[in-house]
Image (tube, rainbow, N blue to C red):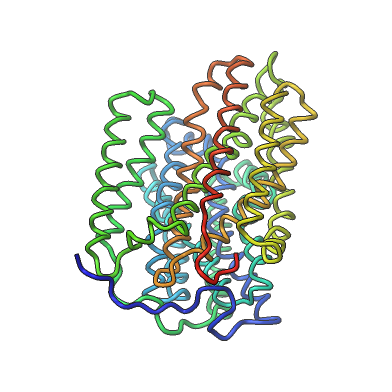
Amino acid sequence: MNAPAPTSAIRTEPGSDITLVRGGRAVALVATLILGVLSYQLNASMLTPALPHMATELGVGVGEVSQVSSLFFLAGAIGGIVLSRWSDYIGRRRALFIVLGILAVGTLMCMFAPNLPLLLVGRVLQGASSAAFQLAYIILSESLSAKVFGTTLGIITAVNGGVGGVDGYIGGVLVESFGFRSIFVVIFIVGLIAILCVTLTVPKDGPVVTSGKMDWWGAAALSVGLIGITYFVSQGGSAGWLDPMTLVYLAVAIVAFVIFWFVEKRRKSPLIATHHLKSRQVWPVVATTVLTLSSVFAVINFTVVVLSQTPEIGFGLDAATAAALFLVPAALVGVVAAPFSGWLAGKVGWILLLRVGLILSLAAVAAIALFPQNMPLVIASIAVLGVTYNGLVLTTINGLGVLMSPDDAPAALPGLNGAAFGIGAGLGIGIVAPFVAQGSIGGFSTALWVSAGIVALALITSLLIARRPGQKV
Protein backbone atom coordinates (compact mmCIF):
# COMPACT_ATOMS: atom_id res chain seq x y z
CA MET A 1 0.00 0.00 0.00
CA ASN A 2 1.35 3.41 -0.93
CA ALA A 3 1.41 6.04 1.78
CA PRO A 4 -0.51 9.26 1.11
CA ALA A 5 1.60 12.03 -0.35
CA PRO A 6 2.31 15.07 1.84
CA THR A 7 -0.39 17.65 1.51
CA SER A 8 -0.94 21.20 2.61
CA ALA A 9 -4.27 22.72 3.54
CA ILE A 10 -5.13 26.40 3.44
CA ARG A 11 -6.87 26.18 6.79
CA THR A 12 -9.21 24.17 8.98
CA GLU A 13 -11.74 26.78 10.12
CA PRO A 14 -13.28 29.90 8.58
CA GLY A 15 -11.11 32.92 8.79
CA SER A 16 -7.83 31.35 9.88
CA ASP A 17 -4.76 31.46 7.67
CA ILE A 18 -5.51 33.74 4.71
CA THR A 19 -6.35 37.36 4.06
CA LEU A 20 -10.08 37.76 4.63
CA VAL A 21 -12.52 39.64 2.44
CA ARG A 22 -14.39 42.34 4.34
CA GLY A 23 -16.87 45.18 3.91
CA GLY A 24 -18.21 45.94 0.46
CA ARG A 25 -15.96 43.32 -1.14
CA ALA A 26 -17.52 40.67 1.09
CA VAL A 27 -21.03 41.76 0.11
CA ALA A 28 -20.08 41.66 -3.57
CA LEU A 29 -18.54 38.20 -3.14
CA VAL A 30 -21.66 36.80 -1.48
CA ALA A 31 -23.87 38.35 -4.19
CA THR A 32 -21.68 36.75 -6.86
CA LEU A 33 -21.87 33.33 -5.25
CA ILE A 34 -25.66 33.68 -4.98
CA LEU A 35 -25.80 34.37 -8.72
CA GLY A 36 -23.58 31.38 -9.37
CA VAL A 37 -25.70 28.90 -7.42
CA LEU A 38 -28.91 30.51 -8.66
CA SER A 39 -27.87 29.93 -12.27
CA TYR A 40 -27.76 26.23 -11.39
CA GLN A 41 -30.82 26.10 -9.12
CA LEU A 42 -33.11 27.78 -11.65
CA ASN A 43 -32.53 24.78 -13.92
CA ALA A 44 -34.27 22.67 -11.30
CA SER A 45 -37.00 24.95 -10.00
CA MET A 46 -38.11 26.87 -13.10
CA LEU A 47 -38.29 23.87 -15.40
CA THR A 48 -40.92 21.75 -13.65
CA PRO A 49 -43.94 23.54 -15.22
CA ALA A 50 -42.33 23.20 -18.66
CA LEU A 51 -42.16 19.40 -18.84
CA PRO A 52 -45.53 18.84 -20.60
CA HIS A 53 -44.70 21.59 -23.13
CA MET A 54 -41.30 20.00 -23.79
CA ALA A 55 -42.93 16.66 -24.47
CA THR A 56 -45.38 18.23 -26.93
CA GLU A 57 -42.82 20.31 -28.84
CA LEU A 58 -40.24 17.53 -29.07
CA GLY A 59 -42.82 14.89 -29.97
CA VAL A 60 -42.15 12.52 -27.06
CA GLY A 61 -44.12 11.16 -24.14
CA VAL A 62 -44.15 12.69 -20.67
CA GLY A 63 -42.43 9.56 -19.35
CA GLU A 64 -39.52 10.07 -21.72
CA VAL A 65 -39.20 13.77 -21.00
CA SER A 66 -39.01 13.01 -17.26
CA GLN A 67 -35.36 12.11 -17.93
CA VAL A 68 -34.81 15.87 -18.23
CA SER A 69 -35.02 16.01 -14.43
CA SER A 70 -33.65 12.61 -13.42
CA LEU A 71 -30.44 12.90 -15.49
CA PHE A 72 -29.98 16.49 -14.31
CA PHE A 73 -29.91 15.46 -10.65
CA LEU A 74 -27.81 12.36 -11.31
CA ALA A 75 -25.21 14.49 -13.11
CA GLY A 76 -25.39 16.90 -10.19
CA ALA A 77 -24.46 14.18 -7.70
CA ILE A 78 -21.42 13.21 -9.76
CA GLY A 79 -20.36 16.72 -10.74
CA GLY A 80 -20.69 17.97 -7.19
CA ILE A 81 -18.13 15.45 -5.97
CA VAL A 82 -15.68 15.43 -8.88
CA LEU A 83 -15.53 19.13 -9.78
CA SER A 84 -15.48 20.40 -6.21
CA ARG A 85 -12.64 18.00 -5.29
CA TRP A 86 -10.76 19.01 -8.44
CA SER A 87 -10.77 22.57 -7.07
CA ASP A 88 -8.35 21.41 -4.36
CA TYR A 89 -5.81 20.92 -7.14
CA ILE A 90 -6.59 23.78 -9.55
CA GLY A 91 -8.00 26.48 -7.24
CA ARG A 92 -11.54 27.59 -6.35
CA ARG A 93 -11.77 30.53 -8.76
CA ARG A 94 -10.61 28.52 -11.75
CA ALA A 95 -12.93 25.64 -10.84
CA LEU A 96 -15.88 28.03 -10.52
CA PHE A 97 -15.15 29.42 -13.99
CA ILE A 98 -15.08 25.85 -15.37
CA VAL A 99 -18.36 24.98 -13.64
CA LEU A 100 -20.15 28.09 -14.92
CA GLY A 101 -18.66 27.51 -18.38
CA ILE A 102 -20.04 23.96 -18.43
CA LEU A 103 -23.40 25.36 -17.36
CA ALA A 104 -23.36 27.94 -20.18
CA VAL A 105 -22.55 25.30 -22.83
CA GLY A 106 -25.26 22.98 -21.50
CA THR A 107 -27.81 25.80 -21.43
CA LEU A 108 -27.05 26.74 -25.04
CA MET A 109 -27.52 23.11 -26.07
CA CYS A 110 -30.90 23.00 -24.31
CA MET A 111 -31.91 26.33 -25.85
CA PHE A 112 -31.38 25.12 -29.41
CA ALA A 113 -31.84 21.34 -29.05
CA PRO A 114 -33.93 20.03 -31.96
CA ASN A 115 -34.66 16.72 -30.26
CA LEU A 116 -34.76 15.02 -26.86
CA PRO A 117 -31.31 13.29 -26.99
CA LEU A 118 -29.48 16.61 -27.50
CA LEU A 119 -31.63 18.23 -24.85
CA LEU A 120 -30.64 15.48 -22.41
CA VAL A 121 -26.94 16.00 -23.17
CA GLY A 122 -27.42 19.67 -22.33
CA ARG A 123 -29.22 18.78 -19.12
CA VAL A 124 -26.36 16.50 -18.05
CA LEU A 125 -23.92 19.39 -18.53
CA GLN A 126 -26.22 21.70 -16.61
CA GLY A 127 -26.55 19.16 -13.80
CA ALA A 128 -22.78 18.77 -13.46
CA SER A 129 -22.64 22.45 -12.51
CA SER A 130 -24.19 21.60 -9.12
CA ALA A 131 -20.60 21.90 -7.89
CA ALA A 132 -21.35 25.64 -7.78
CA PHE A 133 -22.94 25.04 -4.37
CA GLN A 134 -19.99 23.17 -2.89
CA LEU A 135 -17.54 25.71 -4.31
CA ALA A 136 -19.62 28.56 -2.90
CA TYR A 137 -19.56 27.02 0.58
CA ILE A 138 -15.79 26.49 0.47
CA ILE A 139 -15.07 29.97 -0.91
CA LEU A 140 -17.16 31.48 1.89
CA SER A 141 -15.22 29.44 4.44
CA GLU A 142 -11.86 30.46 3.02
CA SER A 143 -12.68 34.13 2.38
CA LEU A 144 -14.89 35.34 5.25
CA SER A 145 -14.48 35.51 9.00
CA ALA A 146 -16.07 32.88 11.23
CA LYS A 147 -18.54 35.52 12.49
CA VAL A 148 -20.18 35.97 9.09
CA PHE A 149 -19.50 32.54 7.59
CA GLY A 150 -22.58 30.94 9.16
CA THR A 151 -24.99 33.66 8.08
CA THR A 152 -23.72 33.78 4.51
CA LEU A 153 -23.73 29.99 4.25
CA GLY A 154 -27.36 30.09 5.37
CA ILE A 155 -28.15 32.55 2.58
CA ILE A 156 -26.62 30.21 -0.02
CA THR A 157 -28.46 27.25 1.52
CA ALA A 158 -31.75 29.15 1.23
CA VAL A 159 -31.16 29.49 -2.52
CA ASN A 160 -30.90 25.68 -2.68
CA GLY A 161 -34.68 25.58 -2.32
CA GLY A 162 -35.28 28.07 -5.11
CA VAL A 163 -36.62 31.58 -4.64
CA GLY A 164 -39.49 30.89 -2.29
CA GLY A 165 -41.59 29.30 -5.03
CA VAL A 166 -41.60 32.48 -7.13
CA ASP A 167 -39.13 31.00 -9.62
CA GLY A 168 -41.48 28.11 -10.38
CA TYR A 169 -44.31 30.56 -11.01
CA ILE A 170 -42.13 32.68 -13.32
CA GLY A 171 -41.15 29.51 -15.18
CA GLY A 172 -44.81 28.75 -15.77
CA VAL A 173 -45.46 32.28 -17.07
CA LEU A 174 -42.48 32.08 -19.45
CA VAL A 175 -43.60 28.72 -20.81
CA GLU A 176 -47.13 29.89 -21.45
CA SER A 177 -46.01 33.15 -23.06
CA PHE A 178 -42.85 32.25 -25.00
CA GLY A 179 -42.33 28.47 -24.87
CA PHE A 180 -40.00 26.34 -22.78
CA ARG A 181 -36.83 27.58 -24.50
CA SER A 182 -37.37 31.03 -23.01
CA ILE A 183 -36.51 29.58 -19.59
CA PHE A 184 -33.07 28.63 -20.86
CA VAL A 185 -32.60 32.14 -22.25
CA VAL A 186 -33.18 33.60 -18.78
CA ILE A 187 -30.88 31.03 -17.15
CA PHE A 188 -28.16 31.70 -19.74
CA ILE A 189 -28.28 35.44 -19.03
CA VAL A 190 -28.05 34.85 -15.26
CA GLY A 191 -25.08 32.54 -15.87
CA LEU A 192 -23.25 35.12 -18.00
CA ILE A 193 -23.74 37.77 -15.34
CA ALA A 194 -22.40 35.32 -12.74
CA ILE A 195 -19.26 34.68 -14.83
CA LEU A 196 -18.64 38.41 -15.14
CA CYS A 197 -19.10 38.90 -11.40
CA VAL A 198 -16.72 36.03 -10.60
CA THR A 199 -14.09 37.84 -12.65
CA LEU A 200 -14.56 40.98 -10.56
CA THR A 201 -15.16 39.68 -7.02
CA VAL A 202 -13.85 36.16 -6.33
CA PRO A 203 -10.31 36.27 -4.87
CA LYS A 204 -7.55 35.00 -7.11
CA ASP A 205 -6.32 31.50 -6.35
CA GLY A 206 -3.36 31.18 -4.02
CA PRO A 207 -1.24 28.05 -3.55
CA VAL A 208 -3.05 24.79 -4.27
CA VAL A 209 -4.65 23.14 -1.26
CA THR A 210 -3.68 19.56 -2.11
CA SER A 211 -0.47 18.31 -3.66
CA GLY A 212 -0.36 15.40 -6.10
CA LYS A 213 -2.77 14.66 -8.94
CA MET A 214 -6.52 14.43 -9.13
CA ASP A 215 -7.75 10.87 -8.55
CA TRP A 216 -9.71 10.35 -11.76
CA TRP A 217 -9.85 6.55 -11.31
CA GLY A 218 -11.45 6.92 -7.93
CA ALA A 219 -13.81 9.55 -9.35
CA ALA A 220 -14.84 7.14 -12.14
CA ALA A 221 -15.50 4.25 -9.74
CA LEU A 222 -17.51 6.46 -7.39
CA SER A 223 -19.49 7.89 -10.32
CA VAL A 224 -20.47 4.39 -11.49
CA GLY A 225 -21.52 3.58 -7.94
CA LEU A 226 -23.69 6.69 -7.75
CA ILE A 227 -25.30 5.85 -11.10
CA GLY A 228 -26.01 2.33 -9.88
CA ILE A 229 -27.52 3.42 -6.56
CA THR A 230 -29.61 6.13 -8.25
CA TYR A 231 -31.15 3.70 -10.73
CA PHE A 232 -31.57 1.12 -7.97
CA VAL A 233 -33.69 3.59 -6.00
CA SER A 234 -35.65 4.66 -9.09
CA GLN A 235 -36.27 1.11 -10.33
CA GLY A 236 -37.03 -0.20 -6.86
CA GLY A 237 -39.64 2.49 -6.22
CA SER A 238 -41.47 1.76 -9.49
CA ALA A 239 -40.92 -1.96 -10.23
CA GLY A 240 -40.29 -3.29 -6.73
CA TRP A 241 -37.20 -3.79 -4.60
CA LEU A 242 -36.84 -7.46 -5.60
CA ASP A 243 -37.30 -6.87 -9.32
CA PRO A 244 -34.38 -8.48 -11.25
CA MET A 245 -33.33 -5.18 -12.86
CA THR A 246 -33.46 -3.46 -9.47
CA LEU A 247 -31.10 -6.07 -8.07
CA VAL A 248 -28.77 -5.65 -11.08
CA TYR A 249 -28.46 -1.92 -10.36
CA LEU A 250 -27.79 -2.70 -6.68
CA ALA A 251 -25.07 -5.18 -7.65
CA VAL A 252 -23.46 -2.62 -9.96
CA ALA A 253 -23.46 -0.06 -7.15
CA ILE A 254 -21.95 -2.47 -4.62
CA VAL A 255 -19.19 -3.64 -6.99
CA ALA A 256 -18.35 -0.04 -7.95
CA PHE A 257 -18.17 1.09 -4.32
CA VAL A 258 -15.93 -1.87 -3.43
CA ILE A 259 -13.63 -0.99 -6.35
CA PHE A 260 -13.65 2.64 -5.20
CA TRP A 261 -12.58 1.58 -1.70
CA PHE A 262 -9.61 -0.43 -2.95
CA VAL A 263 -8.62 2.28 -5.43
CA GLU A 264 -8.59 4.86 -2.64
CA LYS A 265 -6.42 2.61 -0.45
CA ARG A 266 -3.75 2.49 -3.16
CA ARG A 267 -3.73 6.06 -4.46
CA LYS A 268 -1.07 8.51 -3.30
CA SER A 269 -3.55 11.38 -3.56
CA PRO A 270 -7.01 9.76 -3.28
CA LEU A 271 -10.35 11.41 -3.90
CA ILE A 272 -10.85 10.92 -0.18
CA ALA A 273 -8.64 8.65 1.88
CA THR A 274 -10.23 5.56 3.41
CA HIS A 275 -9.12 6.54 6.91
CA HIS A 276 -11.12 9.74 6.48
CA LEU A 277 -14.14 7.79 5.22
CA LYS A 278 -14.00 5.67 8.40
CA SER A 279 -13.66 8.66 10.71
CA ARG A 280 -16.50 10.07 12.79
CA GLN A 281 -15.90 13.45 11.19
CA VAL A 282 -17.01 12.14 7.77
CA TRP A 283 -19.30 9.12 7.55
CA PRO A 284 -21.82 10.22 10.24
CA VAL A 285 -22.22 13.57 8.46
CA VAL A 286 -22.96 11.85 5.12
CA ALA A 287 -25.24 9.29 6.79
CA THR A 288 -27.18 12.03 8.60
CA THR A 289 -27.67 13.89 5.32
CA VAL A 290 -28.94 10.79 3.48
CA LEU A 291 -31.33 9.88 6.30
CA THR A 292 -32.62 13.42 6.78
CA LEU A 293 -33.38 13.87 3.10
CA SER A 294 -34.90 10.38 2.95
CA SER A 295 -37.37 11.39 5.64
CA VAL A 296 -38.38 15.04 5.69
CA PHE A 297 -37.94 15.73 1.96
CA ALA A 298 -40.36 12.89 1.19
CA VAL A 299 -42.89 14.22 3.69
CA ILE A 300 -42.92 17.79 2.35
CA ASN A 301 -42.44 17.19 -1.35
CA PHE A 302 -44.30 13.91 -1.84
CA THR A 303 -46.51 12.38 0.85
CA VAL A 304 -48.28 15.54 2.03
CA VAL A 305 -48.61 16.92 -1.51
CA VAL A 306 -50.27 13.69 -2.72
CA LEU A 307 -52.48 13.53 0.38
CA SER A 308 -53.60 17.12 -0.12
CA GLN A 309 -54.81 16.32 -3.65
CA THR A 310 -56.52 13.05 -2.75
CA PRO A 311 -60.32 13.39 -2.44
CA GLU A 312 -62.38 11.84 0.37
CA ILE A 313 -59.51 10.76 2.66
CA GLY A 314 -57.34 13.79 1.88
CA PHE A 315 -58.08 17.46 1.30
CA GLY A 316 -59.12 17.23 -2.36
CA LEU A 317 -57.16 20.31 -3.45
CA ASP A 318 -56.02 21.15 -6.97
CA ALA A 319 -52.29 21.17 -7.72
CA ALA A 320 -51.88 24.96 -7.57
CA THR A 321 -53.69 25.30 -4.23
CA ALA A 322 -51.77 22.36 -2.76
CA ALA A 323 -48.47 23.97 -3.74
CA ALA A 324 -49.57 27.34 -2.35
CA LEU A 325 -50.51 25.82 1.01
CA PHE A 326 -47.86 23.17 1.53
CA LEU A 327 -44.80 23.95 -0.63
CA VAL A 328 -44.48 27.72 -0.85
CA PRO A 329 -44.82 28.50 2.91
CA ALA A 330 -42.04 26.08 3.90
CA ALA A 331 -39.79 27.49 1.18
CA LEU A 332 -40.49 31.10 2.18
CA VAL A 333 -39.94 30.39 5.89
CA GLY A 334 -36.69 28.62 4.98
CA VAL A 335 -35.41 31.68 3.13
CA VAL A 336 -35.58 33.63 6.40
CA ALA A 337 -34.68 30.79 8.77
CA ALA A 338 -31.55 29.55 6.97
CA PRO A 339 -29.39 32.71 7.38
CA PHE A 340 -30.53 33.05 11.00
CA SER A 341 -29.67 29.39 11.60
CA GLY A 342 -26.17 29.92 10.23
CA TRP A 343 -25.67 32.89 12.54
CA LEU A 344 -27.01 30.95 15.52
CA ALA A 345 -24.81 27.93 14.73
CA GLY A 346 -21.76 30.14 15.03
CA LYS A 347 -22.92 31.07 18.54
CA VAL A 348 -24.15 27.76 20.02
CA GLY A 349 -22.37 25.18 17.83
CA TRP A 350 -23.14 23.55 14.49
CA ILE A 351 -23.51 19.98 15.78
CA LEU A 352 -25.77 20.99 18.68
CA LEU A 353 -28.05 23.04 16.42
CA LEU A 354 -28.26 20.16 13.93
CA ARG A 355 -29.46 17.84 16.69
CA VAL A 356 -31.98 20.40 17.95
CA GLY A 357 -33.30 20.82 14.40
CA LEU A 358 -33.67 17.05 13.98
CA ILE A 359 -35.54 16.70 17.30
CA LEU A 360 -37.97 19.46 16.35
CA SER A 361 -38.36 18.05 12.84
CA LEU A 362 -39.16 14.63 14.31
CA ALA A 363 -41.85 16.22 16.47
CA ALA A 364 -43.39 17.97 13.44
CA VAL A 365 -43.40 14.82 11.29
CA ALA A 366 -44.89 12.80 14.16
CA ALA A 367 -47.67 15.39 14.53
CA ILE A 368 -48.57 15.00 10.85
CA ALA A 369 -48.47 11.19 11.19
CA LEU A 370 -50.79 11.32 14.22
CA PHE A 371 -53.35 13.66 12.59
CA PRO A 372 -52.90 13.40 8.79
CA GLN A 373 -56.49 14.50 8.08
CA ASN A 374 -56.33 17.63 10.24
CA MET A 375 -55.62 20.23 7.58
CA PRO A 376 -54.79 23.21 9.87
CA LEU A 377 -52.39 21.05 11.91
CA VAL A 378 -50.69 19.70 8.78
CA ILE A 379 -50.26 23.22 7.39
CA ALA A 380 -48.82 24.42 10.72
CA SER A 381 -46.48 21.42 10.95
CA ILE A 382 -45.17 22.01 7.42
CA ALA A 383 -44.52 25.63 8.36
CA VAL A 384 -42.59 24.41 11.42
CA LEU A 385 -40.52 22.18 9.12
CA GLY A 386 -39.72 25.31 7.12
CA VAL A 387 -37.84 26.52 10.21
CA THR A 388 -36.49 23.24 11.59
CA TYR A 389 -35.67 21.39 8.36
CA ASN A 390 -35.16 24.07 5.68
CA GLY A 391 -33.56 26.38 8.23
CA LEU A 392 -31.79 24.60 11.08
CA VAL A 393 -30.99 21.18 9.60
CA LEU A 394 -30.07 21.98 5.99
CA THR A 395 -27.93 24.95 7.02
CA THR A 396 -26.02 23.08 9.72
CA ILE A 397 -25.51 19.93 7.65
CA ASN A 398 -24.07 22.01 4.80
CA GLY A 399 -21.87 23.90 7.25
CA LEU A 400 -20.58 20.68 8.80
CA GLY A 401 -19.79 19.40 5.32
CA VAL A 402 -17.28 22.25 5.05
CA LEU A 403 -16.03 22.41 8.65
CA MET A 404 -15.56 18.66 9.14
CA SER A 405 -13.85 17.99 5.81
CA PRO A 406 -10.25 16.69 6.08
CA ASP A 407 -7.48 19.31 6.03
CA ASP A 408 -5.76 17.59 3.11
CA ALA A 409 -8.99 17.37 1.07
CA PRO A 410 -11.22 20.32 2.07
CA ALA A 411 -13.58 19.90 -0.89
CA ALA A 412 -14.05 16.13 -0.45
CA LEU A 413 -16.76 16.08 2.23
CA PRO A 414 -18.81 18.97 0.72
CA GLY A 415 -18.88 16.99 -2.54
CA LEU A 416 -19.90 13.73 -0.87
CA ASN A 417 -22.50 15.59 1.17
CA GLY A 418 -23.93 17.19 -1.95
CA ALA A 419 -24.34 13.77 -3.56
CA ALA A 420 -26.01 12.52 -0.36
CA PHE A 421 -28.74 15.14 -0.80
CA GLY A 422 -29.85 13.71 -4.15
CA ILE A 423 -29.53 10.08 -3.08
CA GLY A 424 -31.49 10.70 0.11
CA ALA A 425 -34.32 12.54 -1.65
CA GLY A 426 -34.75 9.77 -4.21
CA LEU A 427 -34.45 6.99 -1.63
CA GLY A 428 -37.05 8.53 0.68
CA ILE A 429 -39.70 8.81 -2.04
CA GLY A 430 -38.88 5.29 -3.24
CA ILE A 431 -39.41 3.89 0.26
CA VAL A 432 -42.76 5.55 1.00
CA ALA A 433 -44.24 5.50 -2.53
CA PRO A 434 -45.71 1.95 -2.23
CA PHE A 435 -47.60 2.94 0.93
CA VAL A 436 -48.86 6.19 -0.57
CA ALA A 437 -49.93 4.32 -3.72
CA GLN A 438 -52.43 2.33 -1.64
CA GLY A 439 -54.62 5.44 -1.64
CA SER A 440 -55.90 4.76 1.87
CA ILE A 441 -55.51 6.72 5.07
CA GLY A 442 -53.71 3.70 6.51
CA GLY A 443 -51.21 3.81 3.65
CA PHE A 444 -50.55 7.52 4.15
CA SER A 445 -50.19 7.06 7.91
CA THR A 446 -47.71 4.22 7.41
CA ALA A 447 -45.68 6.34 4.98
CA LEU A 448 -45.57 9.20 7.48
CA TRP A 449 -44.54 6.97 10.39
CA VAL A 450 -41.83 5.38 8.25
CA SER A 451 -40.52 8.89 7.55
CA ALA A 452 -40.66 9.71 11.25
CA GLY A 453 -38.63 6.59 11.99
CA ILE A 454 -35.99 7.64 9.45
CA VAL A 455 -35.77 11.08 11.10
CA ALA A 456 -35.07 9.26 14.38
CA LEU A 457 -32.27 7.33 12.67
CA ALA A 458 -30.84 10.62 11.37
CA LEU A 459 -30.86 11.95 14.93
CA ILE A 460 -28.95 8.85 16.09
CA THR A 461 -26.28 9.21 13.40
CA SER A 462 -25.93 12.91 14.25
CA LEU A 463 -25.02 11.85 17.81
CA LEU A 464 -22.04 9.98 16.33
CA ILE A 465 -20.51 13.07 14.69
CA ALA A 466 -17.26 13.86 16.51
CA ARG A 467 -15.29 17.10 16.46
CA ARG A 468 -11.70 17.08 15.35
CA PRO A 469 -9.23 17.76 18.21
CA GLY A 470 -9.21 21.47 19.02
CA GLN A 471 -12.18 22.20 16.74
CA LYS A 472 -15.13 24.28 17.89
CA VAL A 473 -18.23 23.24 15.94
Left or right relative to 252: residue 435: right
Q: Which image quarter: residue 312?
A: top right
Placement of 434 over or under 383, stated as above or below? above
Mark yes or no: residue 112 visible.
Answer: no
Which residue is at the front of the view, 115 or 203? 203
Horizontally, residue 97 falls left or right of residue 387, namely left
Which residue is painted at 38% across and 57% down in the image? Answer: 277
| Total numbered labels | 0
Where residue 140 appears, x then y in whole percent? Answer: 58, 71
Is residue 463 left or right of 246 when viewed as pictured? right
Residue closest to the far front: 469
Q: Which quadrant holds the N terminus?
A: bottom left
Instruction: Name the quadrant of the C terminus.
Output: bottom right
- For the point 38% across and 24% down, the residue is 239
Whole-percent x, y for residue 216 in the image:
27, 63
Q: Is residue 196 above or below residue 105?
A: below
Between 304 and 109, the one lying in front of the other is 304
Residue 94, quarter of the rendered image = bottom left
Q: Position of residue 92 (x, y in %)?
A: 46, 74
Residue displayed at 53% across by 53% down: 184
Extreme residue toward the right, this view: 376
Q: Is residue 339 visible?
A: yes
Rendered location of residue 241, percent (x, y): 37, 26
